[in-house]
Image (cartoon, rainbow, N blue to C red):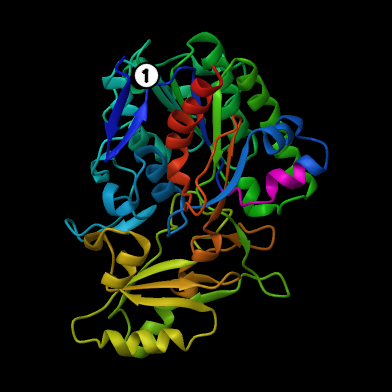
Amino acid sequence: MAASVTVNGRSYRTPEAPVVIVCVDGSEPGYVERAVEAGVAPFLGRVLKTGTAAVGDSVVPTFTNPNNLSIVTGAPPSVHGICGNYFLDPESGKEVMMNDAKFLRVDTIFKAFQDAGARIAVVTAKDKLRGLLGKGLTLAPGRACSFSSEKADKATLAENGIDGVLQLVGKPLPGVYSAELSEFVFAAGVKLMQRDRPDVMYLSTTDYIQHKHAPGTPVANAFYKMMDGYLAQLDAMGCVIALTADHGMNAKHDAEGKPDVIYLQDHFDAWLGAGMARVILPITDPYVVHHGALGSFATVYLPKSADAAAMIAKLKGLDGVEAALPRKEACRRFELPEDRMGDLVVVSTRHKVLGTAASRHDLSGLTEPLRSHGGISEQAVPILLNRKVAIAAGRRLRNFDVFDLALNAAAAVARNAA
């Protein structure tokens, strides 16, 4: 392999040991620390003491797709184009899931390394990410695999570069709304490392637990105990491990435990007339049981006759709105692609969420008080490495810096130590 690869304006050294990048969905700072304090995560405890432990910023909107794609491209959404889980496609005029690889505008770090001769493994919890993460890869044994826990039983050589996943992992197909969906990701990662020893591995979980259980609670600690055991096995195999998250999580309910929602479509219908404005919630995905499609970021398409400045003033007058910005300003501030956002961007405060119309949200699946994400208040995420690396004073760390830290900074420390 070449000594390094360059992709999206950044250079990465060829891995000298297997590199495992872990995106723990919804893992706000505090989850790891509370599990360590409870004595259930000894490997992560060692990382906090002898590795690298920092806090960085994810990208806004703090949702799954924009952040996973930022991590694997090393760039913000303004570069790679994935600005939500869901958006209004300007080409078709339809609201669609942002899962199709055609929406990704640049190559991933995986593709750059495969082109240089590296072996790649990508394992996600939910299948919605698989196509985006695997874009451009030649999926075949000995070259790359990309599959999800959700559809592990359907993985084929042609579609995923691997088959017999359930037999390899030795676990049954997990339910999509379960901690086991994420555990399957880690178990698969360990088995793949033992069998194939890929040069670069990416493991991405689901935030089912984090949506329901705060840091330090028994269920959350049990989840991080599970994760700790698998990470310890990867560490024992000599892997460089870098862990981050796609977003944090906050309680989004009132004193009675009911979701604390600003229904934007209802407000715009009252201000402009029914259906004149169009509110898009980028958190929307097929897995709404744990969040009810309620997050803290929305974009709004206005009719040409509307006074955008007047609408912004009305939004700022609503209790719980942290930011209401015109498109150009929002895209500059949050590094978003202008052609894929509405006329306005709205962000709610820490404990509020945004909805469309009250009649459109089915909240019957919310069995615990709502915890969700999407806003500025969920931007802080952990950045952990099982190697000690130097981070320049004053550097603003981003979750999409983890490949740089694992491949460049950690390698530099290893070379200096030798």
Q: Is residue 139 above or below residue 7?
A: above
Q: In the rendering, at what x and y percent does residue 284 appear?
A: 43, 57
Give the camera-side residue of 75 and 216: 75
Viewport quadrant of the N terminus: top left
Disc 1 target residue = 144
Residue drawn at point x = 69 percent, y = 33 percent: 50
Residue 137 figure quarter: top left
Q: Is residue 261 above or below residue 89?
A: below
The answer to whether 208 appears left or right of 36 in the picture is left
Can residue 284 be seen by looking at this rendering?
yes
Helix, strand or loop status at disc 1: strand
Residue 87 lies, in percent from the top left, at 32, 58
- Boundaries of the magenta span: 26-35
- Image coordinates for residue 32, horizontal then vertical, percent: 69, 43
Q: Is residue 328 rendered magenta in the image?
A: no
Rendered image quadrant of residue 316: bottom left
Q: Verify whether residue 34 appears in magenta.
A: yes
- Indicate the amino acid at tag 1: Ala
Pointer 1 local density, CA inside 10 Å: few below 14, some 14–19, many at least 20: many
- Residue 205 visible, this orientation: no
Left or right, 208 with respect to 98, comes to right
The C terminus lies in which quarter of the figure? top right
